[in-house]
Amino acid sequence: MPQFSGIAEKYLAEACIDNNCTDGGSVIVMNPNNGDILAMAGYPNFNLNDPFAINNDELKSNWDNMSQEDRSNALQQMWRNKAISDGYEPGSTFKLITASAALEEGITDTDNKGEFNCSGSIEIAGVRIKCWRYYRPHGAQSLREALMNSCNPVFIGIGQKLGVHTYYSYLEKFGFLRKTGVDLPGEAGSIFLAEDKVGPVELRYYIIWPKI
């Protein structure tokens, strides 16, 4: 829908400029009820009516000195739709997946008061992972509170209880192990190791910092 695209492009550009996003940015606006994509925008963008017009002043100044191959690569990079072709780390938003799997498996409930404890860190296979608030640990928490606090140690512990096989079954059910099939070229797949290659350290990474 054109009105959504215009709004997405406008505010994405403002955000990237205001925050000096040197690598640009991407926005996808979706209908949460059915997954329809209402708008998709990238910054810096280019003029679809003049796709060979360079949108970068530094690149423009060097254009005449570049080889044909370098020019072609620069154009391909300018046209690249990062929203579907690049992987990214969803970070703490992925804790919702872990929480959903734990609830479905009956490992926990949303409001079991004091069920989990954050001491500021958790050790996995000799690697100590800190909570973002390691200097003032969250202490006793329910699942709801752990989500509100985005507490890494709690969710790593939940992931251990789920185990690799069960966790991967939910990655599959949520569609993270396959492409979406969006009707646009260049969609990249997710970046996950094969299930049999995942140990406790890798599982910890996928729970709190996956790249999809």
Image (tube, grey):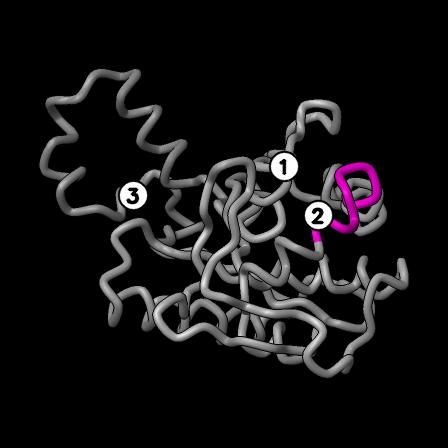
Inspect the image, locate mark 3, and give the three-letter code of the amino acid beneath it. Answer: Ala
| Viewer can see residue 187 | no
Neighbourhood count class around disc 1 (C-alpha, 10 Å): few under 14, some 14–19, many 20 upward:
some
Q: Earlier in the sequence, mark 3 or mark 2?
A: 3
**Callout 2: helix, strand or loop?**
helix
Classify 10 Å Cα crowding around label 3: few (below 14), some (14-19), many (20 and above).
Answer: few
The magenta stretch spans which residues? Answer: 159-167
Q: From the image, tell me which residue sits under label 3.
A: 53
**Tag 2 residue:** 160
Indicate the position of residue 128 as horizontal and vertical percent values: 45, 46
Distance between the alpha carbons at the discs numbered 2 and 1? 8 Å
Q: Are marks 2 and 1 in contact (CB under 8 Å)?
A: yes
If you read the primary sequence from the N terminus, does the residue marked by circle 1 or circle 3 appear first?
3
Is 104 situated left or right of 60 in this image? Answer: right
Residue type at mark 1: give it.
Pro
For marks 1 and 3, give the CA distance. 49 Å
Disc 2 crowd rating (10 Å Cα; few below 14, some 14-19, many 20+) is some
Residue 97: x %, y % from top left: 72, 58
Disc number lying in front (1 or 3): 1
- Amino acid identity at mark 2: Gln
Q: Quadrant of the N terminus?
A: bottom right
Tell me if 63 is positioned left or right of 69 in this view. Answer: left
Residue behind mark 1: 200
Residue at the image position 40 percent from the left and 32 percent from the top:
76
In the image, 74 versus 27, the foreground residue is 27
Residue for point 55% across, 42% down:
124
